Structure formats: C-alpha cells, structure tokens
Amino acid sequence: MLYRQILRTCVLAANKSVVKCNARAGNNVIAAKHSLGSCRSCTSNASSSCPTIGEIVEKWSRRFENEAVPEPIESIEHILAHVVGFKKLLDVTNFRDKRLTNDQLDQLESLCQCRLSRMPVQYIIGEWDFRDITLKLVPPIFIPRPETEILVDIVLKRLKSSRKNDQEIMEVGCGSGAISLALAHSSNQAKYLAIDTSPYACDLTRVNCSQLGLQERLTIVQATLEEDGTVKPSDTFNAQEHIDFETRTFDYIVSNPPYVPIKDLLKLEPEIKIFEDLRALDGGEDGLKIIKPLLKYSAKALKPGGHLFIEVDPGHPEYISFFVKKYDTLKLRYEHTYKDYCNNDRFVEISKIP
C-alpha cells in the first residue's frame, strides 16, 4: 500500500510539476523534511536568496548518493534542466550561477522527493530522448533502454541496403513506440505496424506518433501474441485500417519482448520493480515465453527472404539457433548475433528461407 501511495503521489507531482511528493518510505520522511527546511525559507523572500544551480547540484547529488539513488549527478541535472527549461543538459553546467525562482525551487524539491522514492527520472520529467526522437513517457509503460537504439540501427542498415521503397515492418510489443517511431523517423522506405497487448501502451504510442507527425506511416493495434504463434486483436479492435493477421506478411519483424527469467525479476532495481510494468519484462521461467511464439509467428508472417530482429538475454542466442535448426519446417535460418554496448550477446537476426 505504501508503494502504491508513493506511485500515485509521484505521478501527480511529475504530471503537474508543482505538487509536493509527501509519500516516502520508512525513516526517509523525517530526513527529507529536515533537509528541505532551509531551502524552503527562500520562498517567502526574494528569489535572489534562493540557491544557484551549482549549489542545488551539489546538495541534491550528495543527498541522492547518501540514499543510494543511482546516477546521483545525472538525476539532479535532468530534473534541473526540466524545471528551468533547458533544452540541453550541458546548460546545467554552463549556467551554474543562475538562481532558481521560488516557484522553480518548489517544483524541483517536489520532483527530487520523487527521485528519492526511486521513481525513474524518465517518469519524473515525463519524456526522454531515444536515438533522434523525444518520447513522452508515463508509468508504468516500459522505458526504452539505450542499448535498444542498437536494434534500430541494425534494422536501418538492412533497410538502406535494400532497393525497395515500399517495405512493411511490424513491431511486436511497442510499449512507448520507441522502435517503430525511431525507424519511421529515420527512413521513409517502409510503412509500419505496431502491436501491444496493453491498451495503455497503444495509447502512449499513438500520442508519441502524433507528436512526431508520423500518423500516416504507423498503424497501431492492440493485439496479443498468443502461445501458439497467432496474433489475436483485442475485443475493442479499432485499427486505422483492417488487418488480417492470418494472411498479412512483412519484410521485417522487430521486437524487444519480455525476456527476463521470472526468478531474476526480484533482483531488479526499485525503479523497475516499483514503477515499471513487470509484464513488459517477465519472460517466464526461461525468459523465452514470448520469444518462442514470436519465432512461430514470424515463420508464417515473414515474406520469403524477410528478417526477424529480436533483443534477447545473452543466454538466448544459442537456444534460438538450436530451435530454428530443430524445427526446420519453420523455414527459418539463424543469421547473426549482435553485441550491446557492454559486449554482451543482445540482438539476434533470423531470416525466412525463400
């Protein structure tokens, strides 16, 4: 119940940017009130008595570090940039002597309290850059990770090496729409279809799609990839156009599916366990709960010579290679494994045998 209270309060603060985030866990409540007392005194005086950006960074980064908040300096810098309205994070350093107004300080302290409650910065400021686009983000929709940008780059290279300008790409599990929208923003060689089982994820993808002006290029459908490898639209199916998932085929299918083994979910950081939708991470007992049906569906939905690109756990590529060889009736061929920024096997490319 306490965590739910934290979530409700912090979401309200992040959305309205002026609501105080009073819900805190355990002994942090008293410490937070004591820490904020001296700073709030400037709200009754002239804004010139408020601290500078440099002083705020020093104070809150130390506070975050003392309470084991990850990336303490980056956290306060992102929150500051959001509150002050800086377009570039570097401006936080360039304007260290700038003083906040009373309203800005009040807003900042509310959002910093949310960070102390381990709310991700992306949710606190309500947006995040992914490759060369900016996405609106709201809890509990999965926050796109930096390594997933590599997956986009891999697909784009394939697109650019093709001479076709009318290709069709499907994303399974769109979340905020990061992958499909980054692809559509960078290449006009294709039209895109994105599905997700969550209606909230579909709604967020639509919002981001509209903000980027890509409505004519991306169709968004609430649908579920079933265990047998079929795609079932929701009962409230209302796509921009009729889609027959039994017969529709694609040049590329791309997915960052849930792939964390269920036993590892409890090991995740509080930012993830408390605020993000664990269903977007839960890959079942072996992490392959969605990947296996995805392979089955791709065997039917890929055009001959088409490609499937998947983000996976480092332990999965060997199994996936074994799977497509064992079930040769699927007519899938294991092509390549790509590394992430930490040199882990993270992305798998599969092709459909003509």
Image: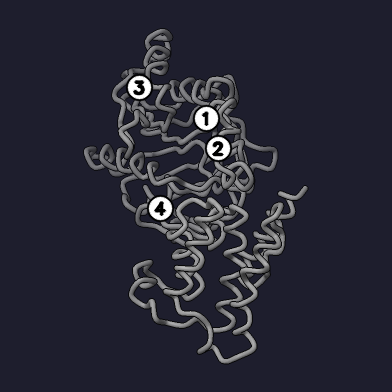
Q: Earlier in the sequence, mark 2 or mark 3?
A: 2
SS for callout 4: strand
Query: Are circles 2 and 1 on residues that touch, CB within 8 Å?
Result: yes
Say whether disc 2 or disc 1 marks the residue closer to the N-terminus. 1
Left or right: 307 in relation to 262: left
Task: Compare marks 3 and 4 and give the one earlier in the sequence.
Answer: 4
| Mark positioned earlier in the residue sequence (2 or 4) | 4
Helix, strand or loop at label 1? It is loop
Give residue 81's position: percent from left, percent from top.
Answer: 45, 70
Question: Which residue type does callout 2 highlight?
Answer: Leu
Q: Which residue is mark 1?
A: 260
Residue occupied by mark 2: 268
Question: Relative to residue 45, is residue 52 depicted above or below?
Answer: above
The residue shown at (49%, 61%) is 62
List x then y, in percent, for residue 253.
41, 33
Distance from disc 1 to disc 4, alpha carbons, whole Å, reads: 22 Å
Considering only vertical position in the picture, is 54 above or below 116? below
